[in-house]
Amino acid sequence: MKDKYEKIVIDAANILHNDTGIEMKDEKGQPRVQSRPERLKDCISFCEKKGWKVTAFLKESTYKYAVSLAKSKSNTTVGDVNILDNLIEQDKLHLIAAEKEDIYWIDYAVAENALIVTHDKFRNEMKEYQDRDWKDINKRTLRGFKFVNNKFILPSLKKKQVTRKQNKEQITLDQIFTAIQKLNTNVAELERYVRKREFTNLKKSQNKPKTKQQQIKSNLEIVNTVVNSLLSSGNAVVASHIQSELARPILGLDENIHEWKAGWSEDLREILGYSKTGGFPKWLISNSKKKIVQQGNKLSYA
């Protein structure tokens, strides 16, 4: 493995949902799920100022969740989602399909000889993908970032150093390298064009009426996004709190739960399709991409 890393890969969801210093809680003291595009923009800017080329990865479902929150009435848990659109247009943020797990961008980072910025410890991935070199992956992962006064800092990230030998042999190699770079640039431009087309189609689909099957799929993507954000810290969360956090984007409800119309939980049950007898926790456990365990009225990742 080369120790001289070429670029940085960012776990965008990990940054987007980071609420250090700006924590919000509901009336029962339970944490609210936040989406803060400003923090992702600040993280990318920090790395770029150090001289690094940056690529951030975000699931389409997490993007859709942020957009749906932004459409909710008087919602203060989401920042400016236009920032995400701008980052996508600038080719700094790549959306990946919901069915692709985190291993997708982890593999990308290894293939591109990149550093990784995330707080994720890859516990599930290490169990599921034992053929990967996790010693190498953990070595290239920078988990020491913080938000201080709402500003991203990562002390362990050094300025990117660029050194080149100057001799006759190197000049010849440089010419070959330049030719390869031109070819890679053409390929990158084509890939960028395809991503923009996909993003344009995604934006259009957001405004089109969905079929019943499409709506079910979209709701399940939101469910997995919210649940992962709430449970990824390792803490157990009350099931009813997860339920209310899902109701906001799926039912389009506003901030104050006390102003919600009576029967909202029944509306959510009908939309998501869980039974009255089995209940919400049982349905959530069976539909989660990661294993969830129940202890009393609380849920957590296994």
Image (cartoon, rainbow, N blue to C red):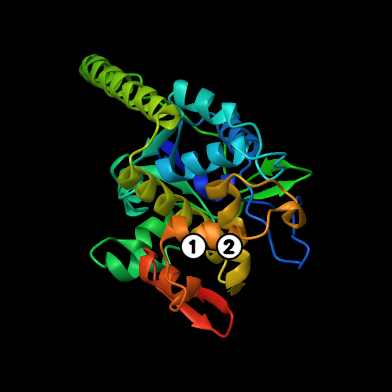
**Residue receiving disc 2:** 265
Q: Is residue 166 above or below residue 151?
A: above
**Callout 1: few (<14), some (14-19), or many (20+) C-alpha neighbours within 10 Å?**
some
Percent coordinates x, y for residue 15 in the rendering = 57, 46
Percent coordinates x, y for residue 26 in the rendering = 74, 60
The residue located at (76%, 67%) in the rendering is 29
Q: Is residue 281 above or below residue 79?
A: below
**Callout 2: few (<14), some (14-19), or many (20+) C-alpha neighbours within 10 Å?**
some
Q: Secondary structure at mark 1?
A: helix
Percent coordinates x, y for residue 62 in the rendering = 48, 45
Q: Nearer the viewer, residue 131 or 127?
A: 127
Horizontal placement of 244 versus 288: left or right? Answer: right
Horizontal placement of 9 versus 195: left or right? Answer: right
Mark 2 touching mark 1, by CB under 8 A?
A: yes
**Residue receiving disc 1:** 269
Q: Secondary structure at mark 2?
A: helix
